[in-house]
Amino acid sequence: MSVPPIVLVVEDEAPQREILVYNLEAEGYAVRQAASGDAALEAARTEAPDLILLDWMLPEVSGIEVCRRLKARSETRAIPVIMLSARSEEVDRVRGLETGADDYMVKPYSVVELMARIRTQLRRTRPGAIGETLTHEDVTVDTAQHRVFRAGRELHLGPTEFRLLTTMMERPGRVWSRDQLLDRVWGRDIYVDSRTVDVHVGRLRKALRGEADAADPIRTVRGAGYALG
């Protein structure tokens, strides 16, 4: 099993935050938390979440400003943001969306609807986590059946190499650091030396090249990590 999608919950009111965390974990998501705008910006940078639930009213830095900064940074621009707010006027919704939020929900909201909207956003950014087929150039990953093909030829990967490939296939071109791949592929609760990533990337490369020694689709970025394409 791959590490589930990571959702960052940004909410300064503890009871509200706890309700969100409970429901997200019940749906199988990995949850990270932040109680202020500054903490949210730091967590978005270090945790590489797949989605952010962002409260508008935050101490120090408002949710609107957090959203603006996230969308202004290349490393966090692609992370979907669902803004949660008690502000229900049309002008507030428009302001939130124009600042860069990918969706906007008014409090009190239906938890069932929120989960549906989360799945909709993740269908764009973590399609592998919800069983969709991934394709990049001549490589295809059927995440539902755990099958991999290159140029029509089926490849046989170990479970770790499969998770590595799926992670890279979801965001072609993105450079993943060793620590980010460790969190995404092995999980942060398991201790694995970062050099282990190099070993498994090497195995994945060998499998992708095959006996015909095809072109290597994985790019090493010196001092940064690895990327697909």
Image (cartoon, grey):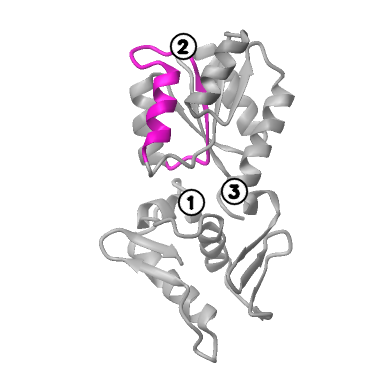
- Residue, disc 2: 57
Residue at (51% x, 62% y) in the render: 164
- Total label count? 3
Q: Amino acid at mark 1?
A: Arg
Asked whether residue 28 is in view, the answer is no
Against 95, residue 117 (above or below) is: below
Amino acid type shown at disc 3 = Arg
- Which residue bears the numbered disc 1? 184
Query: Could you tell which of marks 2 and 1 lies nearer the N-terminus?
Result: 2
Q: Secondary structure at mark 3?
A: loop
Identify the mark nearer the N-term, 3 or 2: 2
Residue bearing mark 3: 126
> In the rendered view, would you say 28 is above or below 229?
above
Question: Where is residue 180 drawn, in percent x and y?
Answer: 40, 51
Where is residue 105? Give x, y as percent. Answer: 63, 19
Marks 2, 1: nearer the viewer: 2
> Which of pointers 1 and 3 indicates the residue nearer the eye?
3
Amino acid residing under circle 2: Met
Q: Dot 1, how many residues are within 10 Å of its Cα: few (below 14), some (14-19), or many (20+)?
A: many
Instruction: Where is residue 32? Give x, y as percent.
Output: 47, 32
